[in-house]
Image (tube, rainbow, N blue to C red):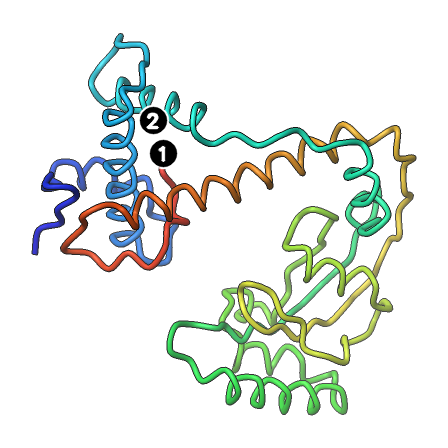
């Protein structure tokens, strides 16, 4: 079934060109098609708003320049103020430590569309209770239960530094004692985690003045990413799209 966006039918040639850029995705075909759909929606919006962009280069390069010009015009977020950065500094000091490292292993119970979350949570809780009684079985349980590729390694994620993974996981990891299993399920956007903590280095927390520029940059990027997702959802909701189930607008736009 052809995929049609606002009357434009995406071609096999476009898919052949896009697909190699998504080979690391769980579903490369879906990821590539989603990127093509979103790019077409953005191009249509740029032309509707008569956005101006440099016209040099090949057509594909010109399209990307048009999308970039549209996003610069329509997706704007203010720079964070000093007091906002200071609140982040005090709220999440573990993210800003220098030299902090923690060895971590985990078992991921992935939350997928249609999953019975209560049943999944119950199962994960049973596994956690067993491991708290028998921590030596962690690697075996990871291989049997984890929805992460690390399960084949007994759940090992190696050494993790602040900023290397999602905040919920990091907060739990760096707050826990070395050599322990966190006695609760840790929930992130990936699902439910049982986390085993290995050796830890606490590192040192720089002064706020030393790292304020980095905090401001990270906060601005996070705000921009959020605004971009909202903008894409708005455009997708207004567009006429057929031939594809597009559950959200979080896929990459331009590789």
| Residue drawn at the location 79% of the way across and 66% of the way down | 198
Disc 1 element: loop
Marks 1 and 2, how far apart at CA: 9 Å
Q: Nearer the viewer, residue 202 or 185?
A: 185
Which residue does the numbered mark 1 point to in the structure image?
Answer: 254
Chain-order first, disc 1 or disc 2: 2
Q: Residue at x 37, y 25 (%)?
A: 70
Considering depth in this image, is 20 or 190 the residue closer to the camera? 190
In the image: residue 43, left or right of residue 75: left
Q: Is 56 on the left or on the right of 177, as rendered?
A: left
SS of the residue under disc 2: helix
Are there few (<14), some (14-19), or many (20+) residues within 10 Å of tag 1? few
* Residue under the point 87% across and 53% down: 201
Q: Which mark is residue 67?
A: 2
Dot 1 and dot 2 residues touching (CB under 8 Å)? yes
The one nearer the camera, 221 or 25, is: 221
Quadrant in which the C terminus is drawn: top left
Residue 163 placed where, x, y %?
A: 69, 46
Question: Residue 53, how many percent across, how many down?
Answer: 32, 14
* Label ID, residue 93: none
Image vertical order of residue 79 relative to residue 109, above or below: above
- Label 2 Cα crowd, 10 Å radius (few <14 / some 14-19 / many 20+): many
Name which quarter of the figure residue 26 lies in.
Answer: bottom left
Q: Position of residue 155 (x, y in %)?
A: 61, 69
């Amino acid at each position: 079934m052809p995929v049609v966006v606002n009357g434009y039918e995406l071609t096999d040639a476009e898919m052949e060109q896009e697909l190699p850029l998504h080979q690391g995705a769980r579903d490369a075909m879906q990821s590539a098609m989603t990127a093509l759909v979103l790019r077409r929606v953005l191009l249509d919006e740029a032309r509707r708003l008569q956005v101006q962009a440099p016209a040099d280069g090949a057509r594909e390069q010109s399209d990307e320049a048009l999308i970039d010009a549209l996003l610069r015009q329509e997706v704007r977020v203010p720079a964070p103020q000093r007091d906002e950065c200071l609140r982040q500094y005090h709220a999440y000091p573990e993210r800003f430590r220098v030299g902090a490292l923690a060895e971590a292993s985990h078992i991921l119970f992935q939350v997928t569309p249609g999953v019975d979350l209560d049943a999944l949570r119950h199962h994960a809780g049973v596994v956690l209770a067993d491991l708290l009684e028998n921590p030596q079985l962690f690697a075996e349980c990871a291989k049997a239960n984890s929805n992460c590729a690390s399960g084949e390694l007994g759940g090992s994620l190696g050494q993790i530094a602040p900023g290397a993974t999602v905040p919920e996981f990091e907060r739990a990891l760096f707050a826990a004692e070395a050599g322990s299993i966190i006695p609760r399920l840790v929930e992130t956007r990936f699902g439910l985690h049982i986390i085993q903590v290995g050796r830890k280095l606490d590192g040192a927390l720089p002064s706020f003045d030393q790292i304020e520029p980095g905090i401001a940059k990270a906060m601005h990027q996070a705000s921009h990413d959020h605004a971009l997702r909202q903008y894409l959802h708005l455009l997708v909701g207004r567009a006429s799209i057929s031939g594809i189930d597009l559950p959200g607008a979080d896929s990459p736009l331009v590789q």
